[in-house]
Amino acid sequence: MSFLHPAGPSIELGINIDHVATLRNARGTRYPDPVEAALQAEEAGADAITLHLREDRRHIRDADVQAIRPLLRTRMNLEAAVTSEMLDFACTIQPQDVCLVPEKRNEVTTEGGLDVVGHFAQVQAAIKQLQEAGIRVSLFIDPDAEQIQAAAEAGAPVIELHTGRYAEVTEEKELQIELLRIRSSVEEGIKRGLKVNAGHGLHYTNVQAVAAIPDIAELNIGHAVVAHAVFVGWRNAISEMKAIMVKARLGQA
Ligand SMILES: CC(=O)[C@@H](O)[C@H](O)COP(=O)(O)O
Ligand SMILES: NCC(=O)COP(=O)(O)O
């Protein structure tokens, strides 16, 4: 049985705090504190806190996840690779959402979506393990019809479309092609009864067109917000992003 999940006029913002931890780790200090960042983000209008516990622990660490989980008043969206270590950790932490992502040790950032088609049985088993622990599972995938179909068949109730390619292209024609890919992927996801989120590489001048797509439920944004906070402050950077998204969704961008 499938349920339709049209997001309607509202759109949520998941603030990714990974790069608050990147800054902390650069000097081995205790500041800036990801816990404080998460709590202030909620106060500034974030609807969820997203954090990616990478296998190499380059930014977020286990202790950050453990400290943040009981303090959140919104929800935690924990991004994790499909490994037994990460799945077991997630089951212990019990975030509201786990977003399964692909990981390459030497990548600068997440380069593409999870290949659900190619690793169907492994992803399906991961979804089952997390769901049995009461966790909602999202799959971070490319805006691609085959991957969306596989995500639905594997039992994921949520997908997050990787917007990295859209964020990277510079030519207007290519940009429109990428936007079209995202729009038709949103339709495909909704048709299959999925909640459709999106994220990666979104910033203050490219988020509008994505936020305007009516059925996207949530955008997860991190790097650009942390960067903007250097100039305007953390809370302002978050409320500014949220206001841009809401305006775009209401057709006022
Ligand atoms: C999966 C994803 O898109 C985000 O977690 C993003 O990757 C931020 O973390 P990195 O910059 O470490 O990739
Ligand atoms: N899943 C995407 C995310 O959490 C944020 O990515 P970015 O804005 O840091 O590129």
Image (tube, rainbow, N blue to C red):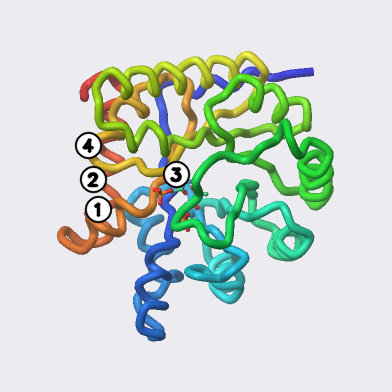
Asked which secondary structure carries label 4, the reply is loop
Disc 1 residue type (three-letter)? Ala
Quadrant location of the C terminus in the rendered image: top left
Question: Where does the image place residue 94, in percent across and percent down from the top left?
Answer: 70, 58
Q: CA distance from mark 1 to mark 3?
A: 14 Å
Q: Earlier in the sequence, mark 2 or mark 3?
A: 3
Residue named by callout 1: 237
Q: Is residue 152 left or right of residue 142?
A: right
Q: Tell us which disc is closer to us: 2 or 4.
A: 4
**Are the residues flagged by discs 1 and 2 in contact, CB closer than 8 Å?**
yes
Residue named by callout 2: 240
Residue named by callout 4: 205
Give neighbour class at mark 1: few <14, some 14-19, many 20+ (Cα, 10 Å): many
Asked which secondary structure carries label 2, the reply is helix
Q: Is residue 169 left or right of residue 66?
A: left
Q: Earlier in the sequence, mark 4 or mark 1?
A: 4
Give neighbour class at mark 2: few <14, some 14-19, many 20+ (Cα, 10 Å): some
Q: CA distance from mark 1 to mark 2?
A: 5 Å
Q: Earlier in the sequence, mark 1 or mark 3?
A: 3
Q: Tell us which disc is closer to us: 2 or 3.
A: 3
Q: Tell us which disc is closer to us: 4 or 3.
A: 4
Residue depicted at x 31% and y 25%: 209
Residue depicted at x 28% and y 26%: 248
Q: Tell us which disc is closer to us: 4 or 1.
A: 4
Disc 4 residue type (three-letter)? Thr
Residue 144, compared with residue 65, is above or below; it is above
Residue 52, compared with residue 172, is above or below; it is below
Quadrant location of the N terminus in the rendered image: top right
Q: Tell which of 29 and 179 is nearer to you.
A: 179
Disc 3 residue type (three-letter)? Asn
Decide if ligand 2 comes within 8 Å of the CB at mark 3: yes
